[in-house]
Amino acid sequence: MISSGKQGGLIIRLVLTGGLVLLPLILLFSGCKKEESSVKEISFWGMGSEGEKIKILIPEFEKQNPGIKVKVQMIPWTAAQEKLISSFAADNMPDLCQLGNTWVPQFVMLEALEPLDGFISKSKTIKPENYFTGIWQTNEVTGKIYGIPWYIDTRLIYYRKDIFKKVGYEEPPKNWEELLNISRKIVKYQNDPNKYAIYLPTNEWAPFVIFGLQNGSDILRDNWTYGNFSAPEFVEAFKYLIQFHKERLTPMGVSQVTNVYQAFEQEFFAMYISVPGTSLNLKKWMKDSTGEKWGTMPIPGKHSSPGVSLAGGSSLVMFKSSKYKPEVWKFIEFLSTKKTQLEFYKVTNNLPALRSAWDEPIFKDDPFIKSFYEQFQFVMPTPKIAEWEQIVFSKLQQYAEYAARGTLTAEEAMKEMDKGVDIILEKRRWMLAR
């Protein structure tokens, strides 16, 4: 086999010695080479099933953009963060990828992401007003936009309508006081020490943060360099949730529940704070797709409903190292059209980021999804720092259990929490002071 370099040299020598018959062949080779070089291949890393399902959308994009090819690599969620960091260290990043929006700040800190403000300002497809405000804000770090919402996520309450009716509630609770009162009535109605009103395990950090945000807590202070969990706003919300444990309205931890869907179906608890994907599993377990026995409701706020919940989901980000930024942006725009978002929902059940997509009957007529639309009007991002997951997983869950078991008071637990958080954020303070 002749290498391309040797092949080219051989052709030139033949032409110089009178082999004019090869001239058409030379033109053919040069034409092929030119055509090949005009096609730009961009690499996309997708996480979990999205990394597989997105492949269904690629042919249409390549048809619309014949000069661009998209190479997709699927990365398991469990290995994604480590894979991205090691690839960054090795200077071997893709052109773009899917990134959980709580991970965006970490890669901004590494200076790995390309700011997208310039692209957005010229785009006819992507405008900030096309998205839910709280979702869009998750991608804004240090005043710049580093990601475009792809699909979105939040938490609300799944509840047993039939049990609510039995304790005199035709409508979901509208505030904290009503939520606590209906929980007490449910436990009284059940009259079973092994059944509860709501599932608020201490090793699930999200409810504590959600209710803290609802009560006006900043969570962290001084440009997110110190913990602020011991401030009155967070302590009040924290004590409110710990009250459910003290009154045995909720089980302590996940060890008491091996299958949350089965537990919900068997009335082990009547309320459960969870994400959109839970509805698919509950439809199977409850054998009820019409909403007779169960439903979804926004999380009630302190005084009214809906209250604040968390802005979650995945964003599309472009890496600074990409050589094909205009082509990458075209792909991001393609994935951000209403048509593409609806097609992606059909194959993944991931909720679309575009507000306009929610006008479709597939969402408006679904009794379980409608509440998510209401909740998305009231979502907030968590603090945009790389250390956030370490804070909530290693510290908040730990001190929530201490308070629930009575080892520490709520005030004591949150003071200790702040001490631990301040240690975690020590490096951040040092970096900002440089």
Image (cartoon, rainbow, N blue to C red):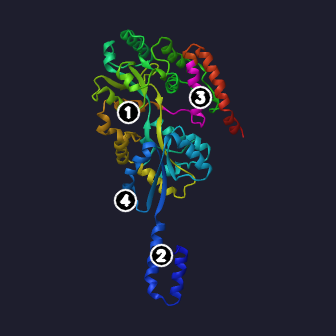
Q: Residues within 10 Å of mark 2 (few under 14, many from 20)?
A: few
Q: Nearer the viewer, mark 3 or mark 1?
A: 3
| Direction from residue 78 to residue 222 in the image, left or right | right
| Residue identifier under label 3 | 394
Tag 4's secondary structure?
helix
Mark 3 vs mark 2: which is more N-terminal? 2
334 or 393, nearer to the observer: 393
Mark 4 vs mark 1: which is more N-terminal? 4
| Residue identifier under label 2 | 30
Tag 2's secondary structure?
helix
Q: Residues within 10 Å of mark 1 (few under 14, many from 20)?
A: some
Q: Nearer the viewer, mark 4 or mark 2?
A: 2
Q: Residues within 10 Å of mark 3 (few under 14, many from 20)?
A: some
Q: Is any part of residue 190 visible from this angle? A: yes
Q: Nearer the viewer, mark 4 or mark 3?
A: 3
- Magenta region: 380-401
136 or 62, nearer to the observer: 62
Would you say residue 28 sits in the magenta stretch?
no
Q: In whole angstroms, how far apart are the C-alphas of marks 4 and 1?
A: 33 Å
Q: Nearer the viewer, mark 4 or mark 1?
A: 4
Residue 152 vertical position relative to residue 72 in the rendered view, above or below: above
Q: Position of residue 229 (x, y in %)?
A: 60, 23
Q: Position of residue 160 (x, y in %)?
A: 34, 21
| Residue identifier under label 1 | 373
Amino acid bearing label 3:
Ser
